[in-house]
Image (cartoon, helix red, strand yellow):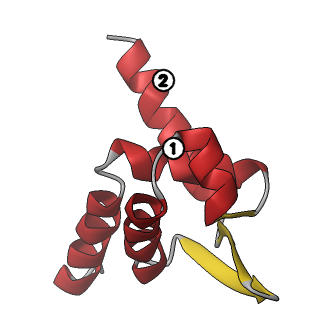
């Protein structure tokens, strides 16, 4: 039996994906881990903008971070999220 709490968590998880920048970040991280400075170059966005989105993704268990010296590298917790995004894109392309 699925509880209301699980429905709420599922909705919150999908809400996390509701911004195009977050989807772009997820797609970048599906290829390899990256630091914010590397993402800045690819996304053409400033550090604070990317960091805010990473905070949301991290809070919802989609990305994790690890420190190497002064840099923090981000990676996906589970690459299955990329399959979900790809499936939605395929659905939308079919329209």
Badge number at residue 24 = 1
Residue at 76 percent across and 63 percent down: it is: 33
Q: Is residue 45 above or below residue 36?
A: above
Along the line of sight, the residue nearer the viewer: 74 or 95: 74
What residue did someone put label 2 on? 90
Q: Is residue 25 above or below residue 6?
A: above
The answer, for residue 82, to whether it is visible in the render is no
Residue at 63 percent across and 45 percent down: it is: 41
The answer, for residue 37, to whether it is visible in the render is yes
Residue at 62 percent across and 56 percent down: it is: 80
Q: Answer with the quarter of the image where residue 94 lies.
A: top left
Along the line of sight, the residue nearer the viewer: 50 or 56: 50
Q: Is residue 89 above or below residue 51?
A: above
The quadrant of the picture occupied by the N terminus is bottom left
Q: Is residue 26 left or right of residue 65?
A: left
Q: Is residue 46 left or right of residue 52?
A: right
Q: Answer with the quarter of the image where residue 74 lies.
A: bottom right
Q: Position of residue 2 (x, y in %)?
A: 28, 78
- Tell me the distance, in whole angstroms, between the alpha carbons under discs 2 and 1: 16 Å
Q: Residues within 10 Å of mark 1 (few under 14, many from 20)?
A: some
């Amino acid at each position: 039996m699925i509880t209301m709490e699980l429905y709420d968590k599922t909705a919150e998880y999908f809400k996390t994906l509701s911004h195009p920048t977050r989807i772009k970040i997820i797609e970048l991280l599906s290829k390899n881990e990256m630091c914010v400075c590397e993402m800045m170059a690819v996304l053409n966005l400033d550090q604070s903008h990317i960091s805010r989105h990473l905070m949301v993704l991290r809070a919802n268990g989609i990305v994790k971070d690890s420190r190497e010296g002064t840099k923090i590298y981000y990676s996906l917790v589970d690459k299955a999220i990329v399959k979900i995004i790809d499936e939605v894109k395929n659905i939308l392309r079919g329209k």
